[in-house]
């Protein structure tokens, strides 16, 4: 039973391997085989018999309901010995047909010179050359056949893909070609009831003859395989029955959904623990602090704002740190009684992150401007100091040690130079220093120009 089931899965395109898809029980050669968990444990699910999709998760049912459902399935859905023989015959037929298809495809392809050229007419009428080819092969046009699709499918079967963007057209035409077969090349038709064989043949043909023109087929893309399966399972409207065919949906595997749920639960647990620690220590935290503490990204934080947004706002406004104060402290905030009551709620609102970021940018620009102005003043003081030093050096170079050693003419020349340099003094200290020199020069000039002072005697009155 296990061998037949594994073979059926492999023929249907599944990869049976450890950690990917496993079939139990798994008997060993020298042991009892691999163990298997009892049913109805964690991760167990009931499948819909018609669609093979998950119908009930074990966690959705109570233990009694789950056990009753399992017993009902065990009693009412068990396969008989006749069902097993039918499955084994189907597996044998599918294996034989796929081996025959593989051998046919791997045979030497017909030379490209034998393939006749064809083209699609602009008015939508069937191409006469394609119809002639079909009539030459079948002697009559089979019912429902599209001659152009059959001829193009024959070309894809023989030469494969010859250019980019041909995958979709190749799938449709190859399915049409394999459906009717090719008596001229000994290819048996794979019509109704041979969907699996037709799907397998299309996969093998494109796998061997994609010629590097389709990256999805070259790397075994799941989307390409699903497209092949949809093309091979297509039925005309008259054979679909009264029910509308189910629309294709790209559903996420149940294993991926469970893994995502586990990751989500783990992230929420870490975020909740980090928030509880911040709240316990009365620490105001930012989004970056919380992401580092919880070891997750900011995108994950924003998906679970219900865990931390309210706490962050309370810590920022100081609400979590407030306790009931004595009544005498409540008086200053407007309490009418001396009873102990909580502190009045503040009207302070937390600044939005966008406005806070804008203010930080403005503050940074102001600080840069202040630093520039401070540096400019410093440079100016340095320039003034250098200019003052050089200015005083020029004045000292022409100033004598003692003005009394000079004549009247030399002192007047110095005074003219001093008076001309006085408005150009670099600072107040230099101006005071030069003013003292001017006063000293003027004093010396006055001493030289005045005659010697004569002693004055008292006049004697005469009668």
Image (spheres, grey):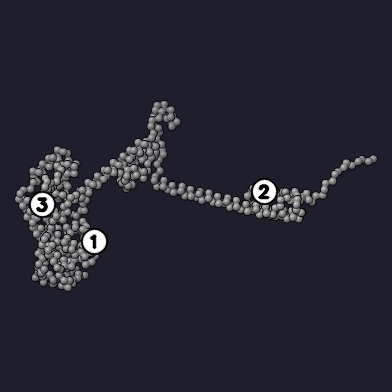
The Cα atoms of the two marked residues, 1 and 2, are separated by 91 Å
Secondary structure under tag 1 reads: helix
- Residue displayed at 9% across by 59% down: 96
Q: Residue furthest left?
A: 82
Query: Nearest the camera: 275 or 143?
Result: 275
Q: Earlier in the sequence, mark 3 or mark 2?
A: 3
The Cα atoms of the two marked residues, 1 and 3, are separated by 34 Å
The Cα atoms of the two marked residues, 3 and 2, are separated by 114 Å
Dot 1, how many residues are within 10 Å of its Cα: few (below 14), some (14-19), or many (20+)?
few
Q: Nearer the viewer, mark 1 or mark 3?
A: 3
Q: Earlier in the sequence, mark 1 or mark 3?
A: 3
- Residue 369, image x, y percentages: 50, 50
Camera sees residue 115: no
Placement of 274 over or under 201, stated as above or below: above
**Residue under pointer 3:** 3
Query: Nearest the camera: 274 or 196?
Result: 274
**Residue under pointer 2:** 433
Q: Residue furthest top?
A: 338
**Residue under pointer 1:** 215
Secondary structure under tag 2 reads: helix
Camera sees residue 346: yes
- Residue displayed at 41% across by 38% down: 347
- Residue 287, image x, y percentages: 36, 44
Q: Quadrant of residue 181?
A: bottom left
Dot 3, how many residues are within 10 Å of its Cα: few (below 14), some (14-19), or many (20+)?
few
- Residue displayed at 23% across by 66% down: 163
Secondary structure under tag 3 reads: helix
Q: Earlier in the sequence, mark 1 or mark 2?
A: 1
């Amino acid at each position: 039973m296990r061998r037949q089931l594994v073979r059926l899965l492999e023929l249907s395109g599944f990869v049976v391997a450890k950690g990917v898809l496993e079939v139990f029980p798994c008997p060993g050669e020298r042991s009892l085989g691999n163990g298997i968990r009892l049913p109805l444990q964690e991760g167990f699910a009931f499948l819909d018999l018609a669609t093979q999709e998950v119908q009930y998760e074990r966690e959705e049912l109570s233990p009694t309901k789950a056990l009753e459902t399992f017993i009902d399935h065990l009693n009412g859905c068990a396969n008989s010995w006749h069902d097993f023989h039918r499955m084994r015959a189907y597996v044998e037929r599918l294996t034989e047909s796929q081996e025959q298809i593989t051998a046919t495809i791997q045979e030497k392809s017909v030379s490209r010179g034998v393939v006749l050229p064809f083209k699609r007419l602009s008015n939508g009428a069937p191409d006469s050359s394609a119809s002639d080819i079909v009539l030459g092969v079948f002697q009559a046009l089979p019912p429902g056949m599209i001659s152009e699709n059959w001829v193009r499918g024959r070309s894809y079967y023989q030469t494969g893909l010859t250019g980019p963007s041909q995958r979709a057209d190749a799938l449709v035409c190859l399915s049409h070609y394999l459906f009717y077969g090719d008596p001229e090349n000994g290819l048996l038709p794979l019509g109704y009831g041979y969907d699996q064989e037709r799907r397998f043949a299309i996969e093998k043909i494109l796998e061997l003859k994609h010629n590097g023109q389709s990256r999805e087929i070259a790397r075994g893309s799941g989307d390409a395989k699903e497209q092949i399966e949809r093309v091979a399972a297509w039925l005309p409207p008259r054979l679909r029955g009264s029910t509308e065919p189910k629309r294709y949906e790209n559903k996420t595997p149940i294993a991926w959904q469970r893994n995502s749920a586990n990751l989500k639960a783990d992230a929420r647990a870490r975020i909740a623990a980090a928030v509880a620690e911040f709240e316990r220590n009365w620490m105001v935290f930012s989004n970056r602090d919380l992401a580092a503490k919880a070891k997750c990204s900011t995108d994950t934080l924003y998906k679970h704002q219900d865990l931390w947004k309210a706490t962050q706002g309370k810590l920022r406004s100081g609400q979590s740190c407030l306790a009931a104060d004595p009544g005498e402290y409540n008086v200053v905030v407007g309490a009418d009684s001396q009873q102990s009551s909580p502190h009045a709620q503040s009207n302070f609102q937390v600044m939005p992150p966008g406005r806070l970021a804008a203010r930080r940018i403005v503050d940074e620009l102001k600080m840069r401007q202040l630093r520039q102005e401070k540096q400019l003043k410093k440079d100016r003081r340095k320039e003034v100091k250098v200019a003052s030093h050089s200015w005083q050096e020029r004045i000292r170079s022409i100033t004598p040690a003692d003005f009394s050693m000079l004549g009247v003419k030399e002192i007047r020349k110095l005074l003219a130079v001093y008076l001309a340099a006085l408005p150009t003094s670099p600072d107040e200290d230099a101006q005071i220093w030069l003013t003292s020199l001017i006063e000293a020069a003027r004093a010396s000039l006055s001493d030289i120009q005045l005659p010697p002072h004569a002693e004055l005697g008292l006049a004697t009155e005469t009668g």
